[in-house]
Image (tube, helix red, strand yellow):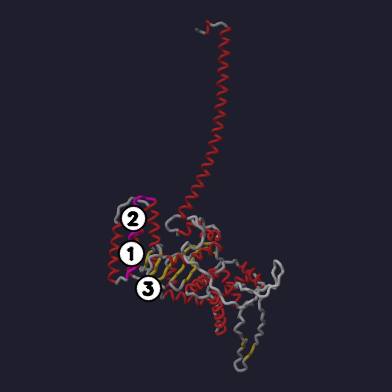
Amino acid sequence: MSWDDLTKEEILSRFLQLEEKIDDLEEQLIQKNEQIDKQAELIEKQEKVIEQQSKRIEELEARLRKYENPHTPPSKRRSGTDESPTSQDDEDDDLRTDGGTPGRKNGHDPEWRSTTDPDEEVEVTYDCCPECGEHFDESVGVSPRLVEEIPDPQPPEVTQYNRHCYQCHSCGTETVATHPDCPDEGQFGVNVIAQSALSRYDHRLPYRKIADRFEQLHGLELSGASAWHATERAARAGRCEYEQIRREIQDADVVHIDETGIKRDGEQAWIWTFSTAQHTLYAVRESRGSDVPAEVLGEDFAGTVICDGWTAYPAFSSNLQRCWAHILREAKDAAEKQVEGEPIYRALTQLYVALQTQLESDLTVRERAELQRVARRELESLIERSVPDGPVATLLGKIEGGLDHWLTFVGEPAVSPTNNAAENALREPVVLRKIIGTLRNDRGMFVHETILSLLATWRQQGRNPYEELRRVVSSNEMISRAHAVPAVETSG
């Protein structure tokens, strides 16, 4: 039916119907727009959450790469982050994952403290019963208890040395009398100097707390700067012994070397360690190159260097032993990331265990040489494997690059297959690095490397660090009186 055939009433009715439909559509459109706005708002919130989660994922991945890469030792992986406080690290060492408690395992014999003879005996008696007041005739036994106590804090001893001056009538030389207990500089004696250095590098105290400790225990007033100067005097006094340690290491047949970062006035520097069975030397340098071992050990060093894969070592010497602990960690990491790495990691582990087992017997030089040739062929067969690009290919490249240095320990009985000794020697400097943050200048570097070297070496040799510090400071005072001592060079 056309519009011409409709009455006015019918046309009006249809218009009304159309208007209702338009109103319905407009309402639906408004609802749709509101839904779209809500969805847009929800999407915006979700995008912000995704962005935050993406940043968090990047942080966690970076931390994972840093602390679970094959070059990170297990002890550092447990600690979590660089910023973890030392106290937390110490607490982590006591945690047990087997549900037990810290301490000696069941079945192990207990270890008791050694008892000492008493300096004094005190008779502790009662005259009467504390319950009813009945008088006691005599005791029926004795229940001894040893109590060890330290003396009350002792005040400092203050001595004035009236040093008389003389002039020779014959040659005109002016002389000031000396005394073995009177230092040539400063107002603090040998014990203060030794305790300052030990408090800083053994007890890890800031200099202001060292000053507080002297005041609390002895009533001795000195500033943090005075504690620093006392520690510097200890370092200057021990520098001759530091150089003697360097000469002993230069003559060694085997030296473990490693390095780690440290800040010098906020800039990147490195603390190197050179360790033997009886000596440990630290050297703080701004270089991480081969010039440092060449300087410390001498360019004509003829011993064997045990090290990791850092390029400075083959640039310094061809007589190396590469660390198996490092390569096994890298192999394990590659096996976890790439399936082709599993048989390589298994083969390396089996080879290392087999070599260790065979070397436990007393092999002749000829037998060692033959074992070395067989082991080299095993490594060469691993290198020849065809693998796709990735962590395993990188691993095989490292094995090939150090092929001449993986098996030195097989031919030389005195050489260790791992560089654990050097890594252990770096633990104390790493803890101190977290505490002090940065060394301020050349003087700080000088003190740091000197005191650390002396303390580590004395401990290796079973000597008492406090007594040794007193010895070197006293000896230095006697030497300085015998002849003039030039200013200490602190460029290193």
Counting residues from the N terminus, which is met first, the one under dot 3 or under dot 1? Answer: 3
Taking 125 as reference, is 435 left or right?
A: left
Task: Please determine whether, in this image, residue 312 is positioned above or below residue 68.
Answer: below
Instruction: Look at 62% across and 93% down and name the residue there.
Output: 169
Quick one: SS at disc 3? loop
Which mark is drawn over residue 344?
A: 2
Taking 193 as reference, is 359 left or right?
A: left
Quick one: SS at disc 1? helix
Q: Nearer the viewer, mark 1 or mark 2?
A: 1
User: Quarter-wise, where is residue 131 in the image?
Assistant: bottom right
Task: Please determine whether, in this image, residue 153 is positioned above or below residue 57.
Answer: below
Counting residues from the N terminus, which is met first, the one under dot 1 or under dot 2? Answer: 2
Instruction: Look at 51% across and 62% down and name the residue there.
Output: 103
Asked whether the residues under the numbered discs 3 and 2 touch, taking CB atoms below 8 Å apart as contact, a structural biologist would say no
Please provide percent x and percent y for residue 200. 57, 69
Q: Nearer the viewer, mark 3 or mark 2?
A: 2
What type is the residue that disc 3 sits on?
Ala
Taking 139 as reference, is 322 left or right?
A: left
Q: Tell me the crowding category of disc 1: few under 14, some 14 to 19, or many 20 or more residues within 10 angstroms, Cα based.
A: some
Residue 466 can be seen in this image = yes
- Does the magenta segment cover residue 158? no
On the image, numbered disc 3 is attached to which residue?
302
Q: Nearer the viewer, mark 3 or mark 1?
A: 1
Counting residues from the N terminus, which is met first, the one under dot 3 or under dot 2? Answer: 3
Front residue of 364 and 303 = 364
| Magenta-drawn segment | 337-361
How many angstroms separate mark 3 from mark 2 (CA)? 34 Å
How many angstroms separate mark 3 from mark 1 (CA)? 26 Å
On the image, numbered disc 1 is attached to which residue?
355
